[in-house]
Amino acid sequence: MRGGLRYGAADGPGSMDRMTVFSVVFLGALAGLYLVEPVASLGHFAARNYNEGWNAYWAHAAVDGAPLYPPPGATVSNNYPPLGFFLVGYLAHWLGDFIVVGRLVGLVSFLIVAINAWLWLRLNDVSRYHATAVVAALVAAICGFAPWYIGANDPQWLAHALMATGLVLLWKDSASSYRLMAALVLVMLGGWVKPLLVPLPLALTAGLYWQARRSFWLWVAGGSVLMAGLSTAALMLFGHDFLTDVFAAPRVLSIKRPLPTILGAVIRLLPVLALAPFGTIRWRPSVAERFVCVYGASAVAVAAIASAGSGVAENAFFDVALAGALGSGLALKRLSGRAVNIGRLAVDAAALGVIAVAGLVLLEAPWAIGHAGRRLGALEARTESTRQDVEFLRTHGPERAACENLALCYWAGAPFNVDFFNFGQKLKSGMVATLECERLFDGHTTRLIQLEERPGPFESRLPAACNEAIDANYVVVRESHNGVLMVPRNAQRAIGSPRVGA
């Protein structure tokens, strides 16, 4: 945290050989290739992940003035802070479809995070070649690890973008009170877009304590005032249901889930994690190295705790990936100029590091690119299938429909009747009695159901008792790429026999 962007002595190619430059170019090209599928999917009416319709409904509620935080026993829930819904909602109000606009915001936010990671590395004298290699590896690794979160209508990357911008703003000159306050506002707003993103604020607070005690106290005081003001405003606008929904949302926990989840994430994110220890672990670390250590350790801790909860996916590890990328950049800076003897050749250690990162990315590339290619190849078919599903919903009464894929009900103009995941968590945790399933899925209350797979005596997002009630009272009348559409058994004759979508 010091003033001004400085360029280190390693800016030019220097000792970097052709293989290193080729690796940097390869990583950049691969990162661009990974982004083809998300960019191509932006305007298509086919859901990228489960959350897209959920976020669209709440963004719509934000701009329409509808209740954002239902009572605890409701069949719908909102466990996110409100800011992201207002930002996307007002943009979409002027620009068009809420899901498509949300996707654009998510993609731009992801790229802003990558740019900020590059700027932070440059502020810490990492050469432009090494910074570019690390950021390209970060983009490729995250796209391969969680492609359904890139270019999706989800506030995750918007929150990271706000916080990462605050990081760079503060790091450039923490002595400036104006920069510090601007950074504080950005970081705080990021937390009011997405919960649990505490590793970066924690690391920044620790860094200020070590480096600039006056700035630390200003940061703490300003943060306390801002948090108190935002919390008071939220309580006045949304009532006590805001606290219950965001901070006390029921979640089924499992102590068996974190370890395999963490191991899988570490393996998939190895390209940006492998070099990080070389850039952060030493006897007398710099301010940047200590910052990355705290950031990385807290990111792993938060990811481990969050992984115990149902519904937590790859997004819990994005802070781990970001911290690893920053640490890897510092590692390349430390290794730069150090020779490693290979036979009769003396090779720059940083060059070997870049080549190693490129090799690790390449190991995952066939699977990730193949997966993206399959999604891209099926995009037109999925779009057409979604169009037919939405038309079916509109034709047969969306007012009393319940969609597991909420984007379908959203595009059909249906009200938000059932939140399958959060309602399922209420049922599984005992907050709501399973008898509610018998009422909701009795063949009369809900007249049209969309599921991602046929129901049976097993748990999905809903408990087994709900799936059994659906199976007993409803029949499949349409199958498509999105799953199945079901109507009450007594209404089957009016709909006809099951049909398979395009």
Image: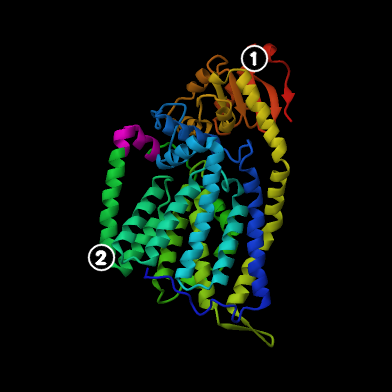
Q: Quadrant of the N terminus?
A: bottom left
Coordinates of residue 133 in the picture (x, y in percent): 59, 67
Cα separation, mark 2 vs mark 1, equals 70 Å
What amino acid does circle 1 point to? Arg
Q: What main secondary structure does the magenta stretch of the protein show?
A: helix
Q: Picture quarter containing residue 345? A: bottom right
Residue 299, image quadrant: bottom left
Other residues around mark 2 within 10 Å, as few (<14) / some (14–19) / many (≥20):
few
**Residue 328 placement, left or right of 83:** right
Can you identify the residue that label 2 sits on? 214
Give the camera-side residue of 494 and 363. 494
Q: Is residue 273 above or below residue 301?
A: below
What residue span does the magenta drawing correspond to? 234-247
Q: Residue at x 51, y 54 (%)?
A: 318
Left or right: 83, with 359 as reference point: left
Residue found at the very far front of the displayed protein: 94
Q: Is residue 454 left or right of residue 185?
A: right
User: In the image, what residue occupies the spot 34% across and 56% down?
Assistant: 182
Q: Residue 337: give x, y in percent of width and height.
A: 55, 82
In the figure, 126 relative to 398: above or below?
A: below
Tell me the quarter of the image containing the C terminus: top right
Q: Which residue is mark 1?
A: 489
Mark sitting earlier along the chain (2/1): 2
Please state which of the two labelled residues, at mark 2 or mark 1, is closer to the viewer: 2
